[in-house]
Every structure is written in C-alpha cells, then in structure tokens.
Image (tube, grey):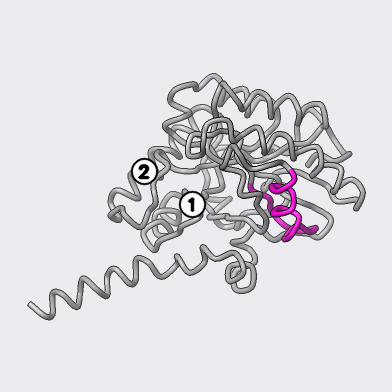
Amino acid sequence: MMGAAAAVVVGAAVQALPTVLTCGAVRRRLCPRLSGRGPVTRLALTFDDGPDRASTPHFLRLLEREQVSATFFLLGVMLDRDPGLGREVAAAGHEVAVHGWEHRNLLGRSPAATYTDIARARDRVAAVAGVAPVWYRPPYGVLTTAALVACRRLELTPRLWTAWGRDWEATRPTESIWRTLVKDLDGGGTVLLHDCDHASTPGAWRGALAVLPRLITWASERDVTIGTLGAHQVPDASRQRRRDGPRVDASIGRNGGGRSG
C-alpha cells in the first residue's frame, strides 16, 4: 500500500516538474528558447485563445494596415465553431499554431487526455491552414511532462513568451496593460496578447487591440522587426525534415520588409 502511494506521489511530481517554468523570470533565465528568445533585431508577436468572429477580425485589419504578421495560437474548440475565420487568419499571411482543443490547465489532465487534446487541435489547425503547425503553447503557460512527451510525438515545438500584458480583464486600462508589457519588453523577445475573450472577461480583447499600435511604434523606434515565431526562431531541423509535404513560411506573404516578418 505504501509503495503504491509513493508511486502516485512520484508520478505526480514528475508530471508537474515542468510547471516551474510557468514563472516568467525562471523560464527566461533557464530556458530562453522555450521563452521565445530570438535575434535582438526581431520581436515575435503572438495571440492566444482565438479565433473569434467578434474580435479577431479587428486584429487582422490593424495588422494588415500596419503590415505586421503574427502567430495565432488557436483553440480547437474555437476553430471548430468558425473554420472559415481560421482560414482567413492563415490566408492573411499569419502563422497559425496550437493552443490545445480546450482551454484547460494541463495539471488536471491525465497523459492520455493531454495527448488527445493536443493531437486533436493539431489536426484541426493543419486541416484549416493546409500545413502542419510547428508551435504549441499550453493554456495558462502550464507545461507538464505529458505535454512535452505529446509534443515530441506530434512533432510540435513548445513556445511560451518573454513579455505579456496580462490583458484578460476588461476593466484593466490600456495604460496598465502597456506598463506590464513594456516591463519585460526588449528586442529578441516574444510578446503574448489575446485576440479573444474565450478565457477572459467579456470585452477584454479591446485592451490588447488598443495597445497594439503602441507596441508597433515601440518596435519601429528601435528598428526592431515584428513578425511571426517562424521568422523569429527556426524550428529544430531534424523535426522539420520529418514533416510530410512542403512548408510555406507564414511570415512570407503579402508584404516584404518593413516591420512585418
């Protein structure tokens, strides 16, 4: 009985071990690539939780106007509701990536459930975009051992972020979002914002939208190119070679040069 109990405790500890990387300061210090570190002349712009017809098109229009490409981490459940919008995101030259099927903390999920969630979302994203996704970001940024194993099996590369705006509260002023974001903002980093309020308070996406022009100006003043994770960091070459079929870099699209990437 004691042996079985000890095994359960050890198993839980192993499963939870990667969650230490949820802390941004620890992650940036110990795992810069996982954090999304790249060349200091670039900044990766990423969005989580969409797509949503009520909000995502606003981001697409602003990004098109500013000639900026980004990486959208899509939820399978949201993509299933509006696959056409997912295709619009990809057709606009943005990179689509995997955020899981449901927005649930992986610590409460078994290894089998974790794998199923990620695999189902990966397949849905691939079907909509017409190309196998490269990146995976877990809900809440909480990685588990099971998620890392699943990513390896599914040929996905986990990526978190270096700076975020904590933009999930609708009552949070834009200035507050910006102060939080700029605190850890620098060239070579990866920014997390949300283009959808699926896991936030209703209307929270408006704060992220309002802060975007300021972020773009910040980058322009420092000659930092904003773009996708694909342009910011090249995936592991051995994984890339194993993928079936040709890939098209989502950062190469309607606009070349300038602030897009």
Query: Is residue 91 visible to the viewer in this orientation of the structure?
Result: yes
Q: Is mark 1 on a helix, strand or loop?
A: helix
Q: Which mark is residue 190?
A: none
Q: Which residue is drawn at 59% across and 37% down?
A: 170
The magenta span reads 175-192
Task: Residue 108 in the image: state x and y as whole percent.
Answer: 31, 54
Is residue 218 positioned above or below 195 on the image?
below
Task: Residue 207 in the image: state x and y as whole percent.
Answer: 67, 37
Q: Which residue lies furthest to the bottom in this view?
A: 2
Label 1 with label 2: CB-CB less than 8 Å: no
Is residue 149 positioned above or below 104 on the image?
below
The N terminus is located in which quarter? Answer: bottom left
Q: Which of marks 1 and 2 is in front?
A: 1
Using the rendered view, name the quadrant where residue 235 is placed: bottom right
Foreground of the two, 8 or 174: 174
Residue 129 among those drawn in magenta: no
Task: Residue 144 in the image: state x and y as whole percent.
Answer: 40, 61
Residue wearing tag 2: 117
User: What type is the residue that disc 2 sits on?
Assistant: Asp
Q: Is mark 2 on a helix, strand or loop?
A: helix
Using the rendered view, name the quadrant where residue 161 is placed: bottom right
Residue wearing tag 1: 140
Q: Residue at x 74, y 53 (%)?
A: 179
Residue 190 among those drawn in magenta: yes
User: What type is the residue that disc 1 sits on?
Assistant: Tyr
